[in-house]
Image (cartoon, grey):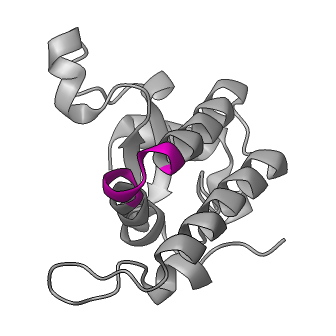
Amino acid sequence: MRNVTKEMIKIYEINKLGYDFMGYIFQRNKELSFHHLVVPKRQCKEFGLGEGYLFWNGAVLKQSTSHAYLHIIERIDRDAFIDITDAMIDENKRKKLEIRNLKRIRDILLSFEREHDHDKDRDGNYIIKRSFVNERIKF
């Protein structure tokens, strides 16, 4: 795990909270990963940011759920992706995971799930996995 991710876990008290920037629960830190928020990893070198693993450019997400799900959303519904990203940028700026942002993200996810509930990928698998829905904090 990268040092910036470890630092963010500590500053945001993610272990104490038990959930990531999108409200997904986790058991161990090794499940968590750095998600590029402002400048996508593929563009970081172009902007002179190296690989872009910088505090202001990141969110801590659970790799197998929120991180994977967010990239699916990015491909299918760019507006939903941007809205979720905006909420996480706000969390990053405030250095705090606030309930209002987590509820905003949940509402965007619920809307996406209503619209794409029966969508399948090229292999015939549903794009919305059960863990994407069930492993979120409850309000």
Q: Residue at x 57, y 80 (%)?
A: 133
Q: Is residue 26 visible?
A: no
Q: Position of residue 40 (x, y in %)?
A: 30, 32
Q: Position of residue 29 (x, y in %)?
A: 47, 63
Q: Residue at x 44, y 34 (%)?
A: 37
Residue 136 lies in the magenta stretch:
no
Q: Position of residue 35 (x, y in %)?
A: 39, 44
- Residue extending farthest to the top is 48
Q: Residue at x 34, y 56 (%)?
A: 71
Please tell me whether the stretch drawn in magenta is mainly helix, strand or loop. Answer: helix
Q: Quadrant of residue 10?
A: top right
Q: Position of residue 134 (x, y in %)?
A: 60, 84
Nearest the viewer among 74 and 28 is: 74
Location of the C terminus (image quadrant): bottom right
Nearest the viewer among 23 and 82 is: 82
Q: Residue at x 47, y 63 (%)?
A: 66
Q: Is 128 located above or below residue 23 in the figure? A: below
Task: State left or right for residue 126 relative to residue 122.
Answer: right
Task: State left or right for residue 75 relative to residue 27.
Answer: left
Nearest the viewer among 121 and 71 is: 121
Q: Is 71 located above or below residue 65 in the figure? A: above
Q: Is residue 42 visible?
A: yes
- Magenta stretch, residue numbers: 73-80
